[in-house]
Amino acid sequence: HDALPILREWAAELKLDAALFERCVASGIKEKAVNDDFAQGSKIGVDSTPSFFVNGKRVKNTIEATSAAIDEALQMQSNIPL
């Protein structure tokens, strides 16, 4: 649980119900879902957060790169006959 201190900090910043948060952590009820998400991210090349994907293609973590990828995807979609 190396991430637990920062998760507790974020929970406090978000004003989450601290007792409920701690019960959730202690129960491990979400552990499988989190591990599955982590495994899926690793499988597709996520090695940092945030990571951005547009139409399944990873883009650089900049507003400019993300915007360009979205514009490209929209342009490609507009060229597809309906």
Image: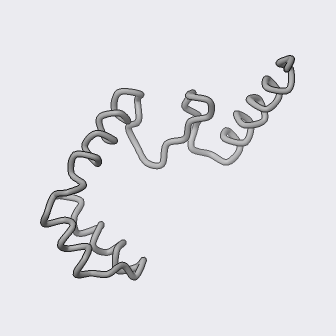
Instruction: Answer left or right for 70 relative to 15.
Output: right
Give the residue furthest to the top.
81
Instruction: Answer left or right for 82 relative to 4.
Output: right
Residue at point 27%, 81% (across, down): 18
Give the residue furthest to the front.
82
Relative to 18, residue 40 above or below: above
Relative to 69, residue 31 above or below: below
For the C terminus, the image quarter is top right
Residue at point 34%, 74% (across, down): 11
Relative to 58, residue 17 above or below: below
Residue 9 position within the rendered picture, expressed as x and y whole percent measured from the top left: 31, 75
> How many badges with numbers are in the image?
0
Residue at point 29%, 35% (across, down): 39
Residue 17 position within the rendered picture, expressed as x and y whole percent measured from the top left: 32, 81
Instruction: Answer left or right for 70 relative to 48.
Output: right
Residue 20 position within the rendered picture, expressed as x and y whole percent measured from the top left: 25, 76
**In terms of depth relative to the viewer, which is nearer, 3 or 31?**
31
**In terms of depth relative to the viewer, which is nearer, 62 or 33?**
33
Q: Quadrant of residue 12?
A: bottom left
Instruction: Answer left or right for 49 relative to 19.
Output: right
| Color encoding of the figure | one colour
Residue 10 position within the rendered picture, expressed as x and y whole percent measured from the top left: 36, 72
For the N terminus, the image quarter is bottom left
Q: Quadrant of residue 59?
A: top right
Relative to 23, residue 71 above or below: above
